[in-house]
């Protein structure tokens, strides 16, 4: 890494993470109950405890991640558990208002 | 106004007629089958009978969980495995499983915040390995509130592998032999840390359980409304208790409600009440004698916006339960209310505190005008023979203000979309410096909740650059933070969502000065998968 220079902010952040141990330290300090931070990127936080390395806006590549079961605790995984989630919402960045949640907390 | 009457759409688990109030209000069926029969009737398409009386059903008998844990399991069986079970059978089964395969009070105690849905906190003390394996997606409390045999923990690993096939590609998984570690190390550790058979459970299971019938003196907090005190009457019903609640907020306005409660595992109080038109939930734990309960109350439709709740049973004896507010500044006169039951006899607020006037006096509440002339420190107010140790603090200077929660998470929503905003509520706790005169040391004296003026600012340079304070949300005079609207925002760089990292500031008056405290707020994207326990 020492011969490579980071060109953008995200790359700079990655450069700052000297070792995986450091990344885990940051995560351990920053994560509020129910957050996923470590799935690179996490859903709520990036591994550095910030938002700089997240997919933003999240709608722009939502299915790219949901289809791959990336944050199954926060985003319905369409690979296996909820294959129909997102049906009729082909373009999440345009039709995000139609996206409903899975409320598995019923009585 | 903090309480909302929003009705949230839910995944129909057993059909559209599943209204919550109806569920909890309905009396138990006269011919309700017992738990084992319900399992035989509903679960044996996949589970099997083992022939072992001590553990009669495959998988089911090798786990212990909280009522919420069992509800979540049955919900998953319905949502993902096609299980069909009537609402009556489901209620009875959760009761049976929580009563017979639950957690002892001491086992659940460290993790009650998750049962209470009080999740704005950074968990401490989670084992590093379990943090990397489990708590990177779930709360640490979620698995810590389960007890399983080692084999059963191993099956949980296999469930994750089968249900989420890309799990091995995630960070902290793809760079190591995830499956081997999960199955042969993590599951073994879980089996040791959270085993199926424990002395605590063996002892609790056979211990006599308290009857919680009676009048309860209740103290609580409703965001946007404030502190309240009330009486809650719990009368026996077929499935638990029928409740009536009458009381008043600190500003004198009334609150009134009714509902039902079930008690699981002999101590887990779960109540559904409608208070002034808003459906509320109570999650409390009763002590072994059934004299006190403590927990949290929150709106059914918005579990993030809740407040602490405490109930003390009327057992005919005098009791001072709280003084509100719980602090008095040296040299100043202020109104204080002593709350309790059977309050008869002389009133004292402790050494050096002069009661200038008794403004109002009742059997369960005494409002006085008091002035502190004595030294700084905790006092033990008393009425007749009843006293409350450390129930009131006298202070000279407000040394620091703690913002609670110190770390909170809110989620963007609304804006015409299906997902509601997830808000957060803040309170300010004052401290004096204690004997060493230094703020932030162990001997700081907790004074109690104090009124504050609330504001936000960007958390760091990146947040300031992205103007998070303009986009991510706002905080009102009650300390309730409302996050920004959902959806891509063209006004932001790359049309980013209205997410952000903010610092929440409480400013509290101390004479002519102001003392500030700060908390950390993450405004995040929606959580599209909401489960009973996160």
Image (spheres, rainbow, N blue to C red):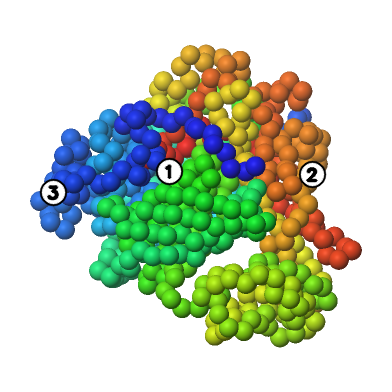
Same-chain status of marks 1 and 3: yes
Question: Quick one: SS at disc 1?
Answer: loop
Question: Quick one: SS at disc 3?
Answer: loop
Evaluate whether residue B238 shows in this view: yes
Evaluate whether residue B143 shows in this view: no
How many badges with numbers are in the image?
3
The image position of residue B46, as x and y in percent, is 20, 37
**Which of the two discs, 2 and 3, sits closer to the camera?**
2
Image-based side of B58 in relation to B435, left or right: left
Q: Which mark is residue B280?
A: none
Q: Closer to the N terminus: mark 2 or mark 3? A: 3
Rate crowding at label 2 as few (under 14), some (14 to 19) or many (20 or more) other CA atoms within 10 Å.
some
Quadrant in which the N terminus of chain B is drawn: top right
The image position of residue B54, as x and y in percent, is 16, 58
Rate crowding at label 3 as few (under 14), some (14 to 19) or many (20 or more) other CA atoms within 10 Å.
few
Image-based side of B344 in relation to B134, left or right: right
Give the letter of the chain under mark 3: B
Q: Closer to the N terminus: mark 1 or mark 3? A: 3
Please name the residue shown 57% across and 21% down the image. Answer: A97
Please name the residue shown 28% across and 63% down the image. Answer: B197
Contact check, label 1 and label 2, Cβ < 8 Å:
no
**Which of the two discs, 1 and 3, sits closer to the camera?**
1
Give the letter of the chain under mark 1: B
The image position of residue A12, as x and y in percent, is 74, 36
- As displayed, is residue B396 above or below residue B150? below
Image-based side of B212 in relation to A50, left or right: left
Q: Which mark is residue B532?
A: 1
In the rendered image, which residue does mark 2 sit on? B457
- As displayed, is residue B87 above or below residue B249? above
In the rendered image, which residue does mark 3 sit on? B50
Rate crowding at label 1 as few (under 14), some (14 to 19) or many (20 or more) other CA atoms within 10 Å.
many
CA distance separating discs 2 and 3: 60 Å
């Amino acid at each position: 890494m020492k011969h490579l220079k980071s060109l953008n902010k995200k790359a700079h952040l990655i450069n700052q993470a000297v070792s995986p141990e450091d990344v885990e330290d940051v995560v351990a300090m920053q994560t509020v109950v129910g957050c996923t931070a470590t799935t690179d990127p996490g859903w709520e936080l990036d591994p550095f405890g910030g938002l700089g390395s997240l997919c933003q806006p999240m709608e722009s590549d939502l299915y790219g991640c949901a289809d791959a079961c990336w944050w199954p605790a926060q985003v319905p995984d369409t690979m296996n558990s909820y294959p129909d989630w997102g049906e009729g919402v082909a373009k999440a960045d345009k039709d995000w208002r139609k996206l409903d949640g899975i409320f598995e907390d019923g009585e | 106004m903090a309480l909302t009457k929003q009705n949230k759409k839910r995944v129909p688990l057993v059909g559209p007629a599943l209204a919550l109030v109806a569920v909890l209000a309905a009396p138990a069926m006269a011919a309700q089958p017992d738990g084992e029969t319900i399992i035989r009737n509903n679960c044996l398409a996949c589970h099997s009978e083992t022939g072992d009386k001590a553990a009669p059903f495959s998988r089911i008998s090798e786990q212990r969980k909280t009522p919420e844990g069992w509800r979540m399991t049955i919900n998953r069986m319905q949502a993902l495995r096609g299980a069909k079970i009537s609402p009556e059978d489901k209620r009875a089964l959760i009761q049976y499983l929580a009563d017979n395969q639950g957690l002892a009070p001491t086992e659940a105690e460290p993790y009650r915040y998750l049962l209470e849905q009080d999740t704005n906190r950074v968990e401490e003390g989670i084992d590093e390995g379990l943090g990397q394996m489990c708590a990177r997606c779930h709360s640490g409390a979620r698995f810590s509130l389960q007890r399983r045999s080692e084999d059963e923990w191993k099956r949980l690993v296999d469930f994750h592998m089968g249900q989420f096939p890309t799990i091995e590609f995630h960070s902290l998984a793809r760079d190591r032999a995830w499956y081997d570690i999960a199955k042969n190390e993590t599951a073994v550790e879980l089996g040791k840390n959270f085993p199926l058979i424990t002395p605590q459970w063996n002892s609790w299971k056979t211990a006599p359980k308290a009857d919680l019938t009676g009048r309860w003196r209740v103290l609580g907090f409703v965001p946007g409304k404030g502190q309240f005190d009330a009486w809650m009457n719990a009368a026996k019903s077929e499935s638990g208790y029928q409740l009536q609640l009458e009381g008043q907020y600190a500003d004198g306005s009334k609150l009134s409600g009714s509902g039902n409660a079930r008690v699981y595992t002999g101590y887990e109080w779960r109540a559904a009440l409608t208070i002034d038109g808003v459906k509320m939930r109570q999650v409390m734990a009763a002590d072994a004698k059934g004299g006190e309960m403590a927990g949290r109350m929150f709106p059914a439709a918005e579990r993030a916006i809740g407040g602490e709740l405490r109930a003390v049973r009327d057992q005919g004896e005098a009791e001072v339960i709280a003084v509100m507010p719980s602090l008095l500044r040296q040299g100043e006169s202020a109104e204080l209310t002593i709350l309790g039951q059977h309050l008869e006899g002389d009133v004292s607020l402790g050494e050096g505190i002069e009661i200038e006037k008794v403004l109002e006096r009742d059997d369960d509440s005494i409002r006085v005008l008091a002035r502190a002339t004595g030294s700084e420190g905790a006092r033990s107010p008393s009425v007749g023979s009843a006293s409350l140790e450390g129930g009131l603090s006298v202070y000279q200077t407000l040394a620091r203000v703690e913002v609670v929660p110190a770390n909170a998470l809110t989620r963007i929503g609304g804006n015409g979309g299906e997902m509601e905003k997830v808000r957060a509520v803040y309170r300010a706790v004052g401290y004096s410096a204690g004997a060493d005169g230094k703020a932030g040391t162990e001997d700081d004296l907790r004074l109690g909740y104090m009124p504050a003026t609330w504001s936000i600012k960007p958390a760091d340079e990146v947040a300031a650059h992205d103007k998070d304070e303009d986009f991510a949300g706002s905080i009102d005079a009650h300390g309730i933070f409302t996050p920004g609207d959902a959806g891509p925002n063209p006004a932001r760089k790359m049309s980013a969502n209205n997410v952000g990292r903010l610092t929440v500031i409480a400013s509290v008056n101390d004479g002519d000065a102001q003392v500030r405290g700060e908390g950390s707020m993450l405004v995040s994207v929606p959580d599209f998968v909401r489960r009973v326990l996160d």
